[in-house]
Amino acid sequence: MPKVNINKTELVWLGKYDDEGKLKAVEKPGPYPFQIVEVINKPRTGKEEPQQTLFEMWEGKEGDTFEEGWRNKLIWGDNKLVISSLLEKFAGKINLIYIDPPFATGADFKFTIKVGEEKEKITKEHSIIEEKAYRDTWGKGLDSYLQMMYERLVLMRELLAEDGSIYVHLDWHVGHYVKVMMDEIFGYENFRNEILTRRGQTKNLQYQFESFKTMNVYNDYILWYSKNPNATFNPPLRKALEYQRIGRWQSMWNNADRPTMRYELLGVNIDSGQWKWSKERAYKAVENYKKYLEESKRTGESLEEYWVRTGKCLEFVWRFGSAKPVYWVSPQEEVICDNNWFDIKGYDYSQDFKTQKSEDLLQRIILASSNPGDIVADFFCGSGTTLAVAEKLGRRWIGSDLSRYAIHITRKRLLDIENCKDLQNEGKKYGKKARPFEILNLGKYERQLWQVKTFTNKDEKQALYEYLAFILKLYGAEPISGFTNIHGRKGNALVYVGAVDSPVTIQEVIDAINDCKKVGQKELHILGWEWEMGLNDAIQELAKKEKIKLKLRIIPKEVLEAEAVKKGDIQFFELAYFKVDIIINGKAVELELKDFVIPHTDLIPEDVQDKTKKWTDWIDYWAVDFDFKNDTFNNGWTSYRTKKDRTLNLKATHNYEKPGKYKIFVKAIDIFGIDTSQVYEVEVTP
């Protein structure tokens, strides 16, 4: 390790400094524009203009309130890229950040998935992208974890508003290291508290052994820092303990050394320590108690009864015998919290996430360090607890996660939020739909970054050739020349590779089919990152007419991960597809989902196949945009399975206001969180 000039207390790890001993600057990729994948609970106005692109780009032009057009944001992607890209529009604007980063285990990426209507359960293992995150985090042990946290915390500080706070949920594995790191990033003077919170369900296995050398771990802790000392803080309250619910006397003296708070009180002079109250306040309280003594002779009431009758606002000071003066603490139903939060659950498992935090915990944090209308962010959002609580408490929110399945679970949780508990009215349901939110990703821009880093210092033609050769090699194909719309061969099949930055179009597939026909080839494989809507259904019919066996395969995001490529962990799955029957009766349309096919079932674990008894078991969610404008999918109708209600409505109906031609966009999401989409054209009559 190079010699580092240390002139202050700081935490140092391998990778923090370069070979010359200089602090490495935190990379800020981008900013990259976000693609809007889906808009939820935002009805179409009828004024939308048809677009030519597959996705709308998020432009960040909405206002600061829902009335001005603000939409909450759920973002799929690497949170370093997400945070860096948010800086352009949100630097200094986020009021509260809560994160629950991985502590020290790959289990953070595993989920329990329910299948079909019978509530069969399977465990979803890590995707390769999630394994990459685990390797990046722990591949070099503690050093790589600290580097991951350092980079993200530095960027998060830039997002915080001047009155903003950040809460970082940790445990004994790494918490002490992150504390020192955060002192460096946020400033020692901006450390507010270390909050103790109850751990989740754990088995005390110590009783199984005759001897053991450690105690069972009961708590996690949360580090709370602010950007500046004047951070928003609304002191949180908790239910009073039993002894706090009755009036009691406490000493007026303490050992703090403030000479200005020394004065004669009820015949007592002190030359060390201080009285807790000012002279004026204490003398007034003495008079209050004298008056009580006089009136109680007549009424016979207790001090607490007198305090209630006089409006619950009087204070009392007295001296009993030769002891020092005492003041009366009134009965309390609620008291201001200290940093011991064992009175509420730290964890909850309603979404079958092993690390899911409780809504009570997030409610206390959000109420304490934000106000209605503020922006709350969580960049390891998991099952969406932070976002759901922010929604219920009237905050705006931004959440992101690396896991596609986490994004899907969060979307369903927010869609079903009206049926969940109300945080401010115990025993009642929340009863309101989620405010408009959108699902975003970095899409082609994340791939473009990979392309630039992977195929650098080459002219455009050479870079394209190397990209095609790279994808073909991963697919087990060989490059071939002599074609305009064919790039390779695998066995008896010809192969076409889609571009990094655009979806494969129907016309591209038609051109590739025509090249196959010219040489008498009967099988064609199309590899693509994204696909023009409705392509699968439309193009398969054409391929059959031309007697071409057509396979459409997805280039997986794992291609971007060098370690996965090195290990050969790349699988090109065929596009799933579904069948929909459409019945039109005047201006009324009924859609019925009739079939859902996953062509690559041979690549799915046997335990999953054994628990999927019928085609509907593969589907977890489907939704319809009845007036698609070639823009963003606008979720106008949805059916999805919840933990309590496993049924799936297979029919969707809609009544159009005006006759005419419309496009219907149907999206189905399988039990792994992967979506399949098709577009249909209909014409309705008066």
Image (cartoon, rainbow, N blue to C red):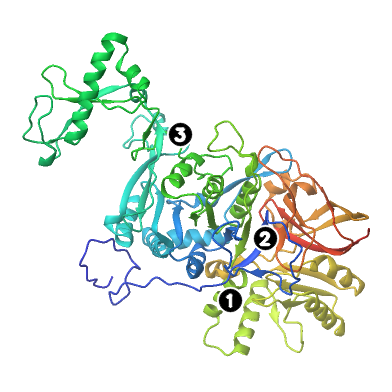
- The residue located at (69%, 48%) in the rendering is 608
Q: Residues within 10 Å of mark 1 (few under 14, many from 20)?
A: some
Disc 2 marks which residue? 38
The amino acid type, in three-letter code, at marker 1 is Gln
What whole-number distance in Å separates the C-alpha atoms at marks 2 and 1? 22 Å
Image quarter where the N terminus lies is bottom left
| Mark 2 element type | strand
The amino acid type, in three-letter code, at marker 2 is Glu
The amino acid type, in three-letter code, at marker 3 is Lys
Residue 88 visible in the current orientation:
yes
Residue 67 position by quadrant: bottom right
Q: Position of residue 596 (x, y in %)?
A: 80, 54
Q: Position of residue 672 (x, y in %)?
A: 66, 53
Do residues under tags 3 and 1 come within 8 Å of each other at their CB atoms? no
Mark nearest the camera among 3 and 1 is 1
Camera-nearest residue between 436 and 362:
436
- The residue located at (50%, 41%) in the rendering is 358
Disc 1 marks which residue? 448
Task: Report whether 337 appears left or right of 442.
Answer: left
Disc 3 marks which residue? 203
The answer to which of marks 3 and 1 sits earlier in the sequence is: 3
